[in-house]
Image (cartoon, grey):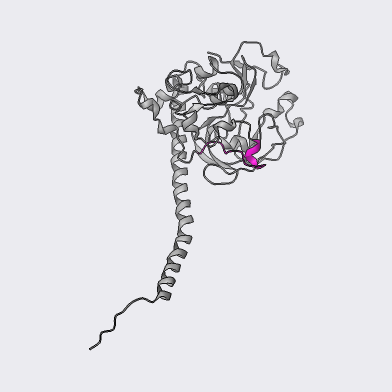
Amino acid sequence: MNRKHLAFTLIELLVVVAIIALLIAILVPTLNGAREQAKKVVCLANLSNIGKALAQYSSEDDKEHAFPVSQSIIDTGLSGNAQLFVSWFAWGGRNGQVPFQFTSFSGILIDDTTIWAARHRPLNRYIYGAYTEEEANEMPAFECPSDSGYPKQIGGGPSSIIDDAPQAMRGIPQYDSVGNSYRGSFISRGGQGQMFTVGALGHRLSTLTNIGELMVAGEPLFFNMLGTNGQITSGDLTLVEMVGWHKRLMTDNLLFGDGSARSTQAVQEAPAPAADYPDIDPSAISFLVRGPGWRLDCYPTPGAVVRGGNDVSWLNLDAGKWPLRSYQNLMR
């Protein structure tokens, strides 16, 4: 008796393959989204832990600073934009793992031989205690799992007007280049030897108000979403459409003064006219940078000198109004 051999026809196989391909096409974006959501949760947990460390730092610091005025901000081996760029990140984190290149500073390595090394970063001991030289190269509490660095310049898109990072350092995770994925919220004015700040940096924690809205640190692209350096002005935020590290338009994770961490959208609030702030020097209105539920400025808390001398006349502001009225000199 002849036996009939059962088998799939070519058409049936093609139909099965097509169904599997369709399922993969449907499921992969969902899985990628779930993976990115998990990374965002880890990032927020990192920021929350940093917030706890900041609270401990403030309670033990002799001047009750709400945010570390690190040695790297005052005693620097760099200058100009290179100093500013690294200072945003050098308050915590590991030794840099790749050469740091910034115009004339090409080739500087942020390792244990520099002022920017992990052992000089004030917040590290509040998270890691006493750590070994080997451990100074791995400090995951300061790493965002989605850290991809500043975007590379492509044509005339948003990345072409980013002025916070040199082209040579773009596309490199901040955790690798400067040892810390998270940028401090340093809104300030100053020159080579002086810095005057109206953000959380250097202020006494007890003097700050609305700390639940006051940004102290976060993923760095948020600051670029608000505009390029020198273009952030109250009532006229030069918003730059960018996608954050967690694949959300105009949104990044931020840490606030009360220790809370949340995803925050770079949305401009309706501008308040200068007439609404008679106690603010008109030339300081640009310090008021805010959005729904967040702010960069610490108004009405006066500004603070965190680097330089007592003379703040170089700011060219009216000392009888905010932010110079009763300003604090919090230099170490």
Q: Is residue 23 left or right of residue 106?
A: left
Residue in front for this viewpoint, 329 or 129: 129
Give the answer, above or below, for where 330 lies relative to 267: above
Q: Position of residue 162 (x, y in %)?
A: 63, 35
Identify which residue is drawn at 46% across, 52% down. Answer: 32
Residue 128 falls inside the magenta stretch: no
Quarter of the figure with the N terminus: bottom left
Residue in front for this viewpoint, 214 or 158: 158
Q: Position of residue 312 (x, y in %)?
A: 67, 14
Give the answer, above or below, for where 301 lies relative to 232: above
Q: Is residue 165 left or right of residue 233?
A: left
Q: Position of residue 180 (x, y in %)?
A: 48, 30
User: What residue occupies the far front of the structure in this picture?
Assistant: 2
Q: Main secondary structure of the magenta part?
A: loop
| Residue 215, quarter of picture | top right
Residue 291: tell me if it is visible.
no
Residue 154 falls inside the magenta stretch: yes
Q: Position of residue 195 (x, y in %)?
A: 61, 18
- The span picked out in magenta is 148-161
Numbered marks: total: 0
User: What residue occupies the far bottom of the structure in this picture?
Assistant: 1
Residue 120: tell me if it is visible.
yes
| Residue 194, quarter of picture | top right
Identify which residue is drawn at 66% across, 11% down. Answer: 311
User: What residue occupies the far right of the structure in this picture?
Assistant: 275
Identify which residue is drawn at 39% across, 77% down. Answer: 9
Give the answer, above or below, for where 142 lies relative to 203: below
Residue in front for this viewpoint, 310 or 302: 310
Residue in front for this viewpoint, 254 or 96: 96
| Residue 208, quarter of picture | top right
User: What residue occupies the far top of the structure in this picture?
Assistant: 310
